[in-house]
């Protein structure tokens, strides 16, 4: 009876992790894939400023949506650690640490750049001596800083995804196909981060790479965890290692 109750608790934990992961994907996808993607115009300070001011409510919602995603990510990091530490405690700890650094730490701090892009355009008293064109340039600079900060966070997240894939592969909690997809997603994140810093000018196709690999890896994993939970009992997973 105790083993059955333990398996049910583990399955509920996996489903909860899947639900939270899906919420993170929706919130982060909205802020990055919709809000900033539609309002930020590369190398055009005037157009970006106009978009932000004309859609101030949407811009603020993008920041709040990101913040919610990063708070949830802190919870997910702990849930993944508790779930996977029997299959490699040190590896699970490093994996969780990388996820905590990526979004709850770097990503959250980077939201200051998102906020400041609006703040300099809406009457910040310390900037009263600057003309509108200069304020627009400041705003674009903050948006650029946010974009690069997002890439730095993506480097840490890519390492997390790769380690998570290894742990899931070891555990056999889910079909190994999903674990391999997470490793592919990791490569996508790392390609975008290091590719943009080392080989500028390839932003567009690298963004497509990370978008596709993340969709295949993270979305499918979150859906499987939410709907199915695990494929084996907890004791069977341990025996598999």
Image: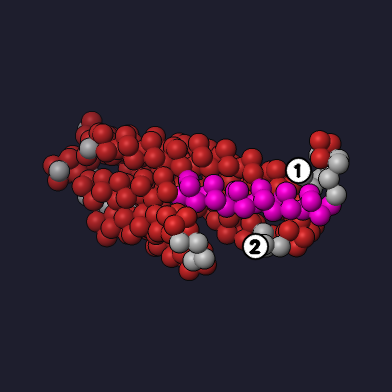
- Residue 9 lies, in percent from the top left, at 33, 36
Q: Which residue is mark 1?
A: 119
Is residue 72 something one can see in this rendering? no
Give the position of the C terminus as an image quadrant: top left
Mostly what secondary structure, the magenta segment? helix
Q: Is residue 57 left or right of residue 194?
A: right
Is residue 187 something one can see in this rendering? yes
Which residue: 60% across, 48% down?
A: 145
Q: Is residue 65 left or right of residue 14?
A: right
Of labels 1 and 2, earlier in sequence is 2
Vertical comparison of 184 with 125: above or below: below
The region drawn magenta spans 132-154
- Residue 164 lies, in percent from the top left, at 32, 46
Q: Quadrant of residue 40?
A: bottom right
Vertical comparison of 113 with 224: above or below: above
Q: Is residue 150 magenta?
A: yes
- Residue 56 lies, in percent from the top left, at 76, 51
Which residue: 35% across, 47% down?
A: 159
- Residue 140 lies, in percent from the top left, at 69, 53
Q: Which residue is mark 2?
A: 42
Give the position of the N terminus as an image quadrant: top left
Q: Is residue 135 magenta?
A: yes
Give the distance between the C-alpha atoms of the residues marked 1 and 2, in whole angstroms. Answer: 19 Å
Q: Label 1 crowding class (10 Å Cα cut-off): few <14, some 14-19, many 20+?
A: some
């Amino acid at each position: 009876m105790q083993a059955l109750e333990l398996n049910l608790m583990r399955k509920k934990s996996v489903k909860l992790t899947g639900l939270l992961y899906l919420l993170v994907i929706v919130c982060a996808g909205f802020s990055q894939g919709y809000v900033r993607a539609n309002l930020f115009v590369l190398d055009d300070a005037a157009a970006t400023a106009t978009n932000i001011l004309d859609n101030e409510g949407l811009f603020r919602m993008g920041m709040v949506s990101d913040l919610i995603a990063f708070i949830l990510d802190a919870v997910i990091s702990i849930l993944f650690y508790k779930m996977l530490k029997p299959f490699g405690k040190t590896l699970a700890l490093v994996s969780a640490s990388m996820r905590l650094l990526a979004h709850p730490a770097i990503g959250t701090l980077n939201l200051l750049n998102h906020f400041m892009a609006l703040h300099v355009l809406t009457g910040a008293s310390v900037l009263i001596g600057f003309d509108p064109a200069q304020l627009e340039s400041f705003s674009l600079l903050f948006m650029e800083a946010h974009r690069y900060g997002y890439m730095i966070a993506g480097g840490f997240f890519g390492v997390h995804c790769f380690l998570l894939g290894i742990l899931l592969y070891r555990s056999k909690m889910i079909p190994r196909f999903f674990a391999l997809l997470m490793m592919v997603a990791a490569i996508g994140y790392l390609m975008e981060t290091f590719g943009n810093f080392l080989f500028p000018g390839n932003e567009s196709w690298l963004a497509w790479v990370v978008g596709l690999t993340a969709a295949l890896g993270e979305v499918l994993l979150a859906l499987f965890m939410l709907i199915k939970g695990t494929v084996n009992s907890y004791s069977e997973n341990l025996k598999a290692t």
